[in-house]
Image (spheres, coloured by chain):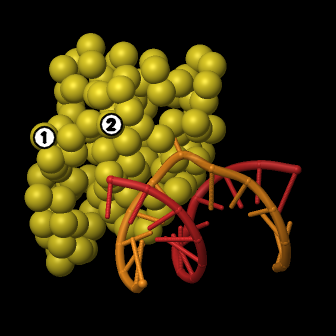
Chain colours: A yellow, B orange, C red
Amino acid sequence: MSPFTQKVILMIQKIPHGKVVSYGQVAAYIGVPRASRQVGWILHSTEGKVDLPWWRVVNNNGYLSIRGNDTYSKSLQKKLLQSEGVEVDGQFHLSMKEFRYRATAEELKLFELPYHYLHSVISKYV
DNA sequence: GCATTGACTCTAG
DNA sequence: CCTAGAGCCAATG
């Protein structure tokens, strides 16, 4: 397991109950701002193998973008989100404005991001 | 090493 | 609000 993968997992595990983040946000928070697709890729490849709140990761416009139709599906993701208070509509859409988790500098400390970069990603997700 | 593959994102129109 | 297209980069074979 690469350092990148470990950071992705760690970041996802920090998402609080009842909140969501986007794939790109996870990537940005660990210091690789354009690696959103890899975050999705990792989530797919580790499904069922790693203990992490995968359902709290959605795309940046608020839609659930999990692809699976069987065990891991949009329906399951919707159910899990709603069970923790996140409202998801019939189009599998939710309000990022309302439910997005915003990390603080303190919470991102372990990723050792350069000072100016750290503050730019924090201000990016207001 | 090279090509392919995405649970992505951003911009333009 | 929607669609198309380009860019993205870790993981795989």
Question: Mark 2 is on which residue type?
Answer: His
Query: Split into 4 quadrants, where in the image is the N terminus of chain A?
Result: top right
Q: Residue at position x 59%, y 17% from top?
A: A71
**Residue A96 x %, y %:** 21, 45
**Badge 2, how many Cα within 10 Å: few under 14, some, many 20+?**
some
- Residue A98's mark? 1
Q: Residue at position x 23%, y 74% from top?
A: A117
| A95 over A29 or under it: above or below | above
Q: Secondary structure at mark 2?
A: loop
Apparent side of residue A83 relative to residue C6 in the rendered image (left or right): left
Q: Chain of mark 1?
A: A
Q: Residue at position x 46%, y 20% from top?
A: A75
Q: Residue at position x 32%, y 51% from top?
A: A61
Question: Mark 1 is on which residue type?
Answer: Glu
**Residue A89 x %, y %:** 30, 28
Does residue A52 show up? no
**Residue C3 x %, y %:** 53, 62
B2 or B4: nearer the eye?
Answer: B4
**Residue A105 x %, y %:** 13, 57
| A38 over A13 or under it: above or below | below
| A30 over B2 or under it: above or below | above
Please say if the residues under marks 2 and 1 sit with CB atoms less than 8 Å apart.
no
- Residue A8's mark? none
Q: Chain of mark 2?
A: A
Cα distance between the residues tagged 2 and 1: 12 Å
Residue, disc 2: A93
Query: Split into 4 quadrants, where in the image is the C terminus of chain A?
Result: bottom left
| Of marks 2 and 1, the one in the foreground | 2
Q: Secondary structure at mark 1?
A: helix
**Badge 1, how many Cα within 10 Å: few under 14, some, many 20+?**
few
Apparent side of residue A42 relative to residue C13 in the rendered image (left or right): left
Which callout, 2 or 1, points at the residue further toward the start of the chain?
2
